Image (tube, rainbow, N blue to C red):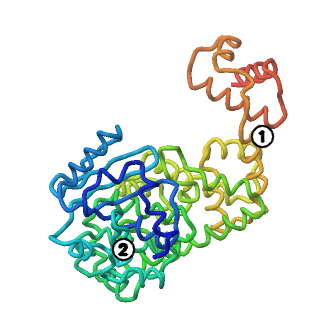
Amino acid sequence: MNDSVLSLLSPENWPFSLEFLPQPVYIVGGAVRDAILGRTREYLDLDFVVPCEAVKVARKIATHYKAGFVLLDPQRQIARVVFPDATADFAQQEGDRLETDLHRRDFTVNAIAYNPHTQEIIDPLKGYVDLQQRLLRMISPANLEDDPLRLMRAYRQAAQLGFTISPDTQATIRSLSSHLTKVAPERVRVELSYMLANPQGTPWIANAWEDGLLPPFFKYATKESVTLLAVVDKVASQLAEILPQFALELAQYLRDTVKTTCLGVAKLASLVNSEGEIAEIELIQLTYSRAEIKAVTTALRVLPQLKKPLMSLREQYFLFQEAGLVFPASAILALAHGTSVEALIPLITRYLNPDDLVAYPTPLLSGRHLMLALNIPASPLVGKLLTEIAVAHIEGKISTAEQAIEFAAGLLDRD
């Protein structure tokens, strides 16, 4: 093991001192795997195996450093300490020996341990060899069956690491695929979300669908709709070359608290039923948030409009009003369904221009101003008049508040 690998696991990089840990103690899982691969992380995520009193060790560290403390599993003695730039999980060793604990894990590459006191690597399952071969290999079928989420995690980790899955492991996953429905849906969603957000995840979503993991969650998905995911990635990449700024829009999260990108929304919309009400049910079952569900159903609802060859300024106005921040997802979805780039470029250009009146209309006056000027009460009529004023503004028929009032008065007289 070279020094650069060991330096990535060095206590000097931790938010707490090694002195707080008993001897022996071991770092296991993804941190060790990634260190061997030379993968660095902006946010440090450490998993420790402690022979005994794991929760007591975690609580002592959290108290000393005034860090967050979460008791994850009192029976199995698992706790988490949360720092601003790091998370440390502490788990009681399963079995009398470390090797017993490692034999109960999911894949050999995640069953390598590191003792920070002695700088010793413990690798009883030859995970280092599989890392060199960039291969995910199960430790045993029973381990996958014990926690069926590991079935889905294999595809996510293969996508994340750029690995392949060993044939016997993939065959076992196929045979156990029905067990994934026993897992809490939100855990499945977390694994799926990573693959939806990254192009390298797309072929593994297709594999997960073909191997029987995803059909129970996306009952209306077909081979064609799963194939569409790769088309979404392709058109997104092509459009990014023409309009780099649009690529940034596709990578944006829906909200700071909702870690689904616009590109992820387009892919999710490809997997669910095209009818919004049915799609909503599917997404609720997977515990997607209201914001994510609204984004997907909006993208599906806007899609037919983006298939039209030509749209008037009025139609474009209503399109942008309805699509909102989901427009990038809707546009990519339309391109994947065959709409030409040439037809969408004008609309995309409008969306990327914050000064464009069609995409981002500037009100000439407020509803209150309109009610006072025309002596009308608050009612849905005010909203309708403001809409017509906005359309007349973008069509160049009016450009001032005074003209807007005169325009609205004319509409009232006509009625």
**Quick check: 85 left or right of 107?**
right
Residue 215 visible in the picture = no
The residue that mark 2 highlights is 121
Q: Earlier in the sequence, mark 1 or mark 2?
A: 2
Seen at 64% across and 62% down, the residue is 334
**Mark 1 residue element:** loop
Q: How many marks?
A: 2
Proximity of marks 1 and 2: CB atoms separated by less than 8 Å: no
Image quarter in which the N terminus is found: bottom left
The residue that mark 1 highlights is 356
The residue positioned farthest toward the bottom in the image shown: 167
Q: Front-most of 375 and 227?
A: 227
| 41 up-or-down from 323: above or below | below
**Mark 2 residue element:** strand
Q: Amino acid at mark 2?
A: Ile
Q: Front-most of 41 and 362?
A: 41
The spot of residue 12 in percent (x, y) is 45, 54
Residue 283 image-quadrant placement: bottom left
The spot of residue 353 in percent (x, y) is 76, 44
Front position among marks 1 and 2: 2
| 390 up-or-down from 377: above or below | below
Seen at 33% across and 74% down, the residue is 111
**Mark 1 surroundings within 10 Å by alpha-carbon count, few (fewer than 14), some (14 through 19), many (20 or more):** some
Seen at 31% across and 76% down, the residue is 177
Seen at 77% across and 37% down, the residue is 357
